[in-house]
Amino acid sequence: MPLKSAPSSPAAIPLSQKAILPHIGGMQDDEMPPLTDPSAAPAVPRGASVIAGFVKNLPGSPGVYRMVNASGDVLYVGKAKNLKKRVTAYTVPEKNTLRIQRMIAMTTAMEFIRTETEAEALLLEANLIKQLKPRYNILLRDDKSFPYIRISAHDYPLVSKHRGAKNNDEEFFGPFASGLAVNETLAVLQRAFLLRNCSDNVFALRTRPCLQYQIKRCTAPCVNKVTREQYAEQVEMARQFLQGKSRSIQERFLQEMEAASAEMDYENAAFYRDRIRALTHIQSHQRVNVEGVESADVHALYQEGGQSCIQVFFFRSGQNFGNRAYFPRHERDETPDNILSAFIAQFYTNKPVPREIIVTHDVVASDIIEEALRLKTGHKVSILRPQRGTKKELVDMAADNAREALARRLAEAAMQSDLFEKLAETFGLNSVPERIEIYDNSHISGAHALGAMVVATPAGFQKNAYRRYNMPADKAGDDFGMMREMLGRRFQSLARDAASSDEKDSGNRPDLLLIDGGQGQLNAVTAIMADMGLSDIAVIAIAKGPDRNAGRERFFRAGHEPLSLPPNDPVLYFLQRLRDEAHRFAITSHRAKRGRAMANNPLDGVPGIGARRKKALLHHFGSAKAVAQAGVTDLQKVDGISRSVAEKIYAFFHSDDG
């Protein structure tokens, strides 16, 4: 498997004994096809014996290894100071936990990358885990980028929110925990320092001050109401505030206010008073500031009920830039030190690393993580677990936040589980569903047709399991045909597995299908499922009531009378929410598909037509359709279109004419 990045171009270890595995479509990790048919393919070797075959050729050097199942999926990514010694431990399954024994039993192949140091191996391991998301690794699930405040490289700089790549010519302050925290800070900067918030294009085209100038939120540098030097001073004060030097700025504003008041210029005194209040407001909303903490992240872990929450607080330039809660995926028996170690390694693969990382628990191989982060950033990084003092108070406060966040999440999960139980009771299901798949179609008169599937579990919506299904032209506009096409493609591999094995995959197999529609859609879906041998999966169709009035929905299930639920029934609200999520996802996907189609111009495919000629043709004829209907003589009238080019354009649009 090609790797996107490696710390120091580690060399891959040649594995002459590595088997070329046949692809067993849809086979699950813990399933083996029955060998009753003599012509069937032989079973793929797996388990400790396969792992032992790799050990004899492994070096005793640092590196990263991957354990792979029969379907080619990576089960686990690990690092080792000594590859040979580490992998040898897997050849004796009984000395490992039950979870690791299951992983060993599924392993059909291993892949290795040798690195120069263990720190490089750790960096590579973290990158691969985030890229491959192996089933048996601890995973950081919420990995969104953090926003920054940017000061642009301009004669009159713009101070704005920024995400993504950074330009070396500009200044960036952060990271902030959320976009809301950035927006609040920007609003204060604008009120306190009167900075512009318009884009460079708008700035260049202004001929008179805008409303921001009238309400004293900007000094209007766009129309020279302030000199370049004066505006640079405003920006410098904002820069100092973001660097944690707000006290000196407030003292300066206080002196200006007192001077204006002494001169009985009360309007100007009130102006400075409001600027002081703005600075005080944002400082009071930073929740906590700790002396001696300049550049640090606080990672506080709390465990309960087999789940963990890690609260991360961000401190930069002595200021608190907010906090965010994370809920990493791990096994119920995983220890806090292992969880925190894996979390920190993955967390900083694409984020700036502070000089201090303050934690609530000991971190496994903290010295290796410190060395890896030093290699990544070029400066010293320390992982600290304080035992007393202000930093200890800080991690205790963060741990309290983690405990409260996890309690809220567990309470929400309990409510969700209760709804699943009530759903099963209401519709007489054989068991409480663990996975519900909701289906919907979207098209406009058959154009840009697609189907959408969303997935709900007791833990909430599983957005990484959502799927879109583009519909072929012959199915577009036919709701029943689109549903057959979508379900056929969704359950093709599942039906193949059901025919080849008595076991069922509980991870990918739904317990209930919720279809947007009435009796007709229900009949079509149940027929499709029966044809594929999956009639044991329950199906419910939900139809809007009279006048499509929400709250008067009717529910259809094979072998049962149509059912309507009381308007205040929580199960009704729950099913409405599931249907609406599927509808939202279908509509959003359809709009994106339609937008892409609208962006595509038929002229894009004409050979020899670049952007300039395409623009000239569209200006002359008004639309691509008119260009397609034009003759060679008419095309030649367009500036830049010679006869030979006109003939190419005409031939492109009329090549199929008889």
Image (cartoon, rainbow, N blue to C red):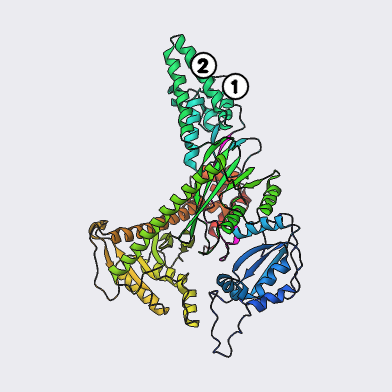
Q: Nearer the viewer, mark 1 or mark 2?
A: 2
Q: Element type at marker 2?
A: helix
| Quarter residue 224 falls in | top right
The amino acid pointed to by label 1 is Arg
| Quarter residue 585 falls in | bottom left
Front-lying residue, 174 or 212: 174
Residue 28 in magenta stretch: no
Residue 228, numbered circle: 1
The span from disc 1 to disc 2 (Cα, nearest Å) is: 24 Å
Q: Residues within 10 Å of mark 2 (few under 14, many from 20)?
A: some
The x, y position of residue 49, in whole percent, is 66, 79
Front-lying residue, 406 or 144: 406
Q: Residues within 10 Å of mark 1 (few under 14, many from 20)?
A: some
The amino acid pointed to by label 2 is Gln
CB under 8 Å between callouts 1 and 2? no
**Lateral position of residue 494 relative to residue 106, left or right:** left
Q: Earlier in the sequence, mark 1 or mark 2?
A: 1
The x, y position of residue 638, in whole percent, is 56, 43
User: What's drawn in magenta, residue-wise?
Assistant: 130-151
Residue at (58% x, 22% y) in the render: 233
Q: Is residue 34 visible to the viewer in this orientation of the structure?
A: yes
The x, y position of residue 363, in whole percent, is 61, 54
Residue 148 in magenta stretch: yes
Front-lying residue, 207 or 627: 207
Front-lying residue, 536 or 450: 536
Query: Which residue is disc 2 drawn over?
Result: 255
| Quarter residue 43 falls in | bottom right
The x, y position of residue 79, in whole percent, is 67, 62
Image quarter in which the N terminus is found: bottom right
